[in-house]
Amino acid sequence: MSTTTATEIVLPGRVEPHGLLVTQRELSAPGAGQALVQVEASGVSFAEQQMRRGKYYDQPAFPFVPGYDLVGTVTAVGADVDPTLVGERVAALTKIGGWTSHALLDAADLVPVPASLDAAEAETFVVNGITAWQMLYRTAKVRPGQTILVHGANGGVGSTLVQLARANGIRVIGTASARNAEAVEALGAAWIDYRGDVPQQVRALVPEGVDAVFDHIGGPGINDSFELLAPHGTLVSYGTAATKNDEGNSRLPVLKLFAQLLVWNALPNKRSAHFFNLWAGKRNLTRFRNRITEDMSKVFDLAAQGALRAQVAARIPLTEAARAMELAESSTVVGKVVIVADARA
């Protein structure tokens, strides 16, 4: 097989969105255990926004191609890979490298995508779906009939969390701005204004506290999230958005958060606090891959059945990734901004 020319979006350093570069690179034929995927969709998540600022906790050195996940079609496979995989639509977690027209990936990392989902719809359920599913059911272990608080219920992970919870009979309170109130309520959550007194608004709905809080904000507000827990409740922290514009060591806010969670877990208050790291179990690669496949497949099945509705905020061509980043960072959208293949690709 001849080489394939891939169009890539390169993050050259700490730049504004318009500083992203559109480049091309030659990819070799798939090696043993690999598959070549023609990328149809990738997403703009908070991780890429932080990487642009040089503030993502364990990002690689500049320059690199961002893109936390992707959906595409397998066009070729290497040795030791089932040849029937060619022509199949698949999804993959990549952490970096997803903003490209073609990607060489380990075939073991590919998860089948139901035919009833288009690429952009499926993309919204890859990293967002895995994150939401694992936080809800593997970390917090929330049960039907319980009540949870989801911060940023209009966002990519937040809107998926709301839908997964509601599909399983879990009551949801979701924070968002007033302009997104209707969208949050349409997902099945009780909306509260994040600009108001959140603890007071939550206590008015659930005086005894909630069974779990999902907090991507961090900063001083994390204390309110913990105090809103009912006895035996669980706080799941998965980001530090409140400190995204802070200067200085990018690891410091996360380390401070870790320290606070440890303090809370040492208290005899029957409540627990966790930091969710999607990649934490990768040391056992086989187990990690099996969990990703199992959980992503469950989310895809729910979406294919209509129990989850894809929240595609916009579909923007790959070569216009700068515009996609700007829109995602504007805080004006519901759901996820998806980068799609250029029409001429």
Image (cartoon, rainbow, N blue to C red):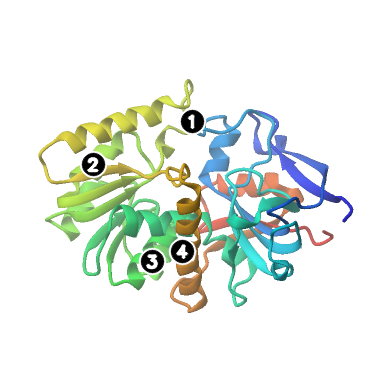
Residue 164 shows which numbered tag? 3
Residue at 31%, 47% in the rendered image: 236
- The residue wearing badge 2 is 224
Tell me which residue sits at (19%, 49%) in the image: 229
Residue 311: x, y in percent? 52, 64
What is the quadrant of residue 84 in the picture?
Answer: bottom right
Residue 245: assigned label: 1
Badge 2 or badge 3: first in the primary sequence = 3
Q: Secondary structure at mark 4?
A: helix
Q: Is residue 166 above or below residue 265?
A: below
Q: What's the residue type where badge 2 is placed?
A: Asp
Q: Amino acid at mark 3?
A: Leu
Q: Are marks 2 and 3 in contact (CB under 8 Å)?
A: no
Label 2 CA crowd tier, 10 Å (few <14, some 14–19, many 20+): few
Q: CA distance from mark 2 to mark 3?
A: 24 Å
Look at discs 1 and 3 and give the one toward the viewer. 3
Mark 4 — residue?
A: 294
Marks 3 and 4 sit apart, C-alpha to C-alpha, by 15 Å
Label located before the other in sequence (2 or 1): 2
Q: Name the residue at the front extreme.
A: 80
Look at label 1 and name its amino acid: Asn
Q: Which label's residue is closer to the chain start, 4 or 2?
A: 2
Distance CA(mark 1)–CA(mark 3): 31 Å
Q: Position of residue 70 (x, y in %)?
A: 63, 55
Residue 242: x percent and y percent? 40, 36
State the residue in front, 285 or 172.
285
Q: Nearer the viewer, mark 4 or mark 1?
A: 4
Pointer 3 local density, CA inside 10 Å: few below 14, some 14–19, many at least 20: many
User: Label 4 to label 1, Cα distance in Å?
Assistant: 36 Å
The one of 204 and 281 positioned closer to us in this rendering: 281
Q: Label 2's element?
A: helix
For the N terminus, which image quadrant? bottom right
